[in-house]
Image (cartoon, rainbow, N blue to C red):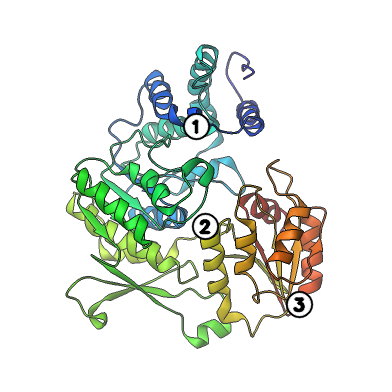
Amino acid sequence: MPGSRKGRHTRASALAWLDRRINFERATPLTGSTVEFGLARMRRLLAAVGNPHVGLPVVHVAGTKGKGSTVAMLSAALQAAGHRVGRYMSPHVNQLEERICVAGRPIPPADLVRAFDVVIPVVDRMDRLATRRGGGPTWFEVLTAVAFLHFARSRADIVVLETGLGGRLDATNVVRPVLSIITSISLDHMRLLGPTVGRIAAEKAGIIKRGCPVISGAVAPAARRVIIATAARRRAALLQLDRDFTAEYRPPSAGDVRDDPLAPGAVAVILPGEGRTAARAYRLAMPGPHQAVNAALVVMAARTLERHGVTLGDRPLRRGLATATLPARIERIADRPQVILDAAHNVASMESLVATLAPSASSLRPRVLVFAASDDKQIDRMLAVTRDAFDHVVVTRYATNPRAATVQRLLEACRAAGLPEPVVAASPPEALRLARALATARGMVCVAGSFFLAAEIRALV
């Protein structure tokens, strides 16, 4: 890795240093040894900058899909209850600062530079001393250290922390949380996490700590078995979806859907011994039936945190669930035609997207899918989910990551999935222009397949 210049950085020079790091990693894909030695490397990095993570009350969130929504909802509820909340999420859509927030505000540029001024010299030293076996800190490890520094300096009284990749060996797994949450688990990142849901669940369950309570929204039998066994082995009190609580999605009224095809619904959380009529319903801001499970995890988290001395009453909880939103999560960014942006990048998230758009199928036609994806994804299966959901497909390749699948691969996947013959666009801007023309003012354009594609399209509108 090239070293950085000495002295105080600016935001531009710090981000340029970080860009060199991620470009190096993209050219040299992660290996098992890089991941395996990550936690030891992360602990050395944090020790060198004063262990800012020690003593921070943390809610640690892992899972394949739903992590970001769960983190956003819980953070909003805690903030509504008067807490000074640190929030760490990934990836960002517009700017890096989105990943690190305190009290609902992204880290200010001056604070970002201040943290980098501490971290960069340490990382440069670690790079020089790194062995081939483990290497220096990764891009994500560096940013996680920056986040911990900001949370400590900003005096966050609780942090809601999203894992990056996996859980067991993730850079965030240096904390001892007050609560762990595992969202749904499905196939993704199989090259690093394992080829089966059970293997992936074992990696995600690595965030479960001895004696620390855990809430799980995993429903796949193989994932549930792993999580239940891990919690029992570590004597962690477990609340398991569909065993200890149930999430029931309550869709918006027909009138609401008529006025807004993406009108959000509500969730009723049912506990053992309670009837459906006794369950309290909570209105949601994020659309889609899949958000019911994420919201139910937040409801159960609120109950658990209350028992552990973190105040979070029913009114702040309701406010958080009814206001929390995220960019690029079934987000409407334009009208006439409606342009819906979603970062769905695996089979399960594509299924959720299609289910959410289904109620508006008769009112918004034609429908056009704009699609691009990373080369390591299950592209054929992702596209097969969209069969019969769209009238036209536009495929393209984004520019911000060299691992984007080629247009030729996307064309072959569309044909294998039985989709309409796709239109090829040379770039995301051209893809959006073509899709809008195909949709006409009466229809819908849906952009999906990757966070990278979502970010490039969102910047255009």
Q: Determine whether the residue tagged by mark 1 lies in a helix, strand or loop.
A: helix
Disc 1 residue type (three-letter)? Gly
Q: Could one spot residue 316 in this view of the protein?
A: no
**Element at badge 3?**
loop
Residue 212 position, x and y percent, is 22, 44
**Residue toward you, 373 or 43:** 373
Q: 235 above or below 250?
A: above
Tag 2 near tag 3, CB within 8 Å:
no
Is label 2 in a helix, a strand or a loop? Answer: loop
- Where residue 244 appears, as percent x and y from the top left, is 23, 65
Q: Position of residue 239 (x, y in %)?
A: 24, 58
Q: Quadrant of the N terminus?
A: top right
Amino acid type at mark 2: Leu
Res 80 quadrant in image: bottom left
Q: Which residue is mark 3?
A: 441
**456 over 44 or under it: above or below:** below
**Looking at this view, is 8 or 188 the one in front?**
188
Residue occupied by mark 1: 32
Image quarter of residue 436: bottom right
Find disc 2 in the rendering and name its residue.
326
Q: Viewer-nearest of labels 1 and 3?
A: 1
